[in-house]
Amino acid sequence: MQKVRISVKKIARYDDLINEYENPIEHACEMREGQVFIANGWEKPAGFCDSAWDSVSPFVMALAHGAEDFYDGWMKNPRSAMISCNDGFRPVSFLLEAMDESAE
């Protein structure tokens, strides 16, 4: 099983939706652009958001087991996927990449 690099690429924030629909909460998202996590199969990396893990984990598991070319050529690198978390107020985009054995 290969390890998978999860890189935080972009964080959006929709204040208009937050102001209209969300109850005030503290620490809704602790992710920062540029953060990198390493996943080992179904093992959620330390410090990774539980909700975001629910969104990315099926793709992480597939990549860890050698899956490629999701959605028939969607990504330039067939051993990767760009997946966003399910937070409609402040979605985070993650680049998932299967790691070469030699890069570990």
Image (cartoon, helix red, strand yellow):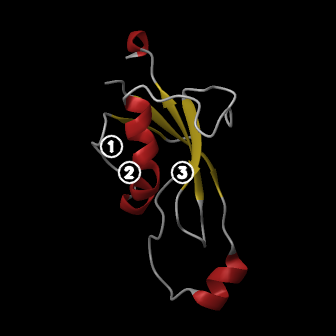
Rendered position, 50 above or below 78: below
Contact between labelled residues 3 and 1, with CB atoms less than 8 Å apart: no
Among numbered discs 2 and 3, the one appearing first in the sequence:
3
Nearer the camera: disc 1 or disc 3: 1
Q: Between residue 72 and residue 103, name the one nearer to us.
A: 72
Q: Are marks 1 and 2 in contact (CB under 8 Å)?
A: yes
Q: Are marks 2 and 3 in contact (CB under 8 Å)?
A: no
- How far across and down, in percent of the image, does residue 86 sit? 52, 64
Q: Residue at x 31, y 36 (%)?
A: 41
Q: Nearer the viewer, residue 23 or 39?
A: 39
Relative vertical location of residue 39 with respect to residue 50 in this rendering, above or below: above
Name the amino acid type tagged 1. Pro
Q: Which residue is mark 2?
A: 48
Q: Nearer the viewer, mark 2 or mark 3?
A: 2
Mark 1 = which residue? 45
Q: Is residue 33 visible?
A: no
Which residue does the image show at 44% across and 77% down from the upper left?
A: 26
How packed is label 3: few (under 14 Cα within 10 Å), some, or many (20 or more)? few
Quadrant that contains the C terminus: top left
User: Which residue is situated farthest in the top direction here?
Assistant: 102
Residue at figure coordinates x 62%, y 81% from the top left: 18
Q: Secondary structure at mark 2?
A: loop
Q: Quadrant of residue 12?
A: bottom right
In the image, 18 versus 52, the foreground residue is 52
Which image quarter is the N terminus in? top left
**Vertical placement of 77 versus 9: above or below?**
above
> Which element carries disc 3, helix, strand or loop?
loop
Q: Position of residue 9 (x, y in %)?
A: 62, 44
Residue 32's label in the rendered image is 3
Label drawn at residue 82: none
Earlier-in-chain disc, 1 versus 3: 3
Q: Quick check: can you spot residue 16?
A: yes
